[in-house]
Image (cartoon, grey):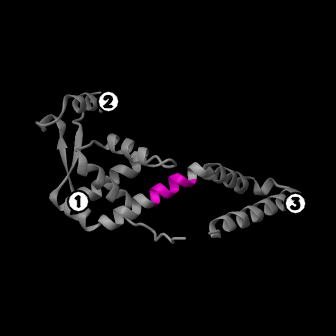
Amino acid sequence: MKNFEKIRGSLKLLILYLLKGEELHGYALMQKLSELFINYKPSSGVIYPALQSLKRSGYIECIEYTKYNNITDEKKELLNNNGNNGKPKILYKITDKGKKYLIENSEKIKKIFEHINNVNEFYNLGGRELKEAMVMVIREIPNLSEKQKKELKNVMVKSSKKIKLILLRD
């Protein structure tokens, strides 16, 4: 079994990774990041501060799409339909410094994707249901009878042991 270190700066590296392929606006980045995860949908309150930090570090630059000559009609249509209240639409583009940083952190990126794949597989194996049940237990603890607490303890201990036995086999 592998112990995963806490992966710091994962979101910023994932944003750079996505921008390596194409220039994107913030909403498109949120959509692409959501596609990577089964259990996580990043909000604008998370994405935009990360983008500002990347910009301050010189890893990305902002381009108003109206001044960008190589934009495709499809991307222009998407930006026009994004409802930005007349404000200029901003595309984010990775800089050479950002590309270098991405290369320097290629092992970290590999670990991030391995972790994402493991978490997604966990959810596919019933992890979503397990998480929902545990959240429900935590929320209901004050209302549980002693009999219910004893039953839950029995189920959780037996399940934990069974999971460990499965993992330790072969």
SS label for mark 1:
helix
Return the x and y of residue 10 as percentages of the image width and height: 38, 61
Q: Quadrant of residue 122?
A: bottom right
Q: Is residue 68 left or right of residue 54?
A: left
Could you give the CA–CA distance between mark 2 and mark 1, rounded to whole angstroms?
Answer: 26 Å
Q: Residue at x 18, y 40 (%)?
A: 64
Q: Nearer the viewer, residue 19 or 42?
A: 19
Q: Residue at x 23, y 45 (%)?
A: 22
Q: Which mark is residue 139?
A: none
Region in magenta: 115-122
Q: Quadrant of the C terminus?
A: bottom right
Q: Nearer the viewer, residue 90 or 151?
A: 151
Q: Amino acid at mark 3?
A: Glu
Residue where numbered disc 2 is placed: 83
Q: Which mark is residue 146?
A: 3
Q: Amino acid at mark 1?
A: Arg
Q: Is residue 142 above or below residue 104?
A: above
Evaluate if marks 1 and 3 touch, with contact meaning CB atoms under 8 Å apart: no
Q: Quadrant of the N terminus?
A: bottom right
SS label for mark 2:
loop
Residue where numbered disc 1 is placed: 56
Circle nearer the viewer, 1 or 3? 3
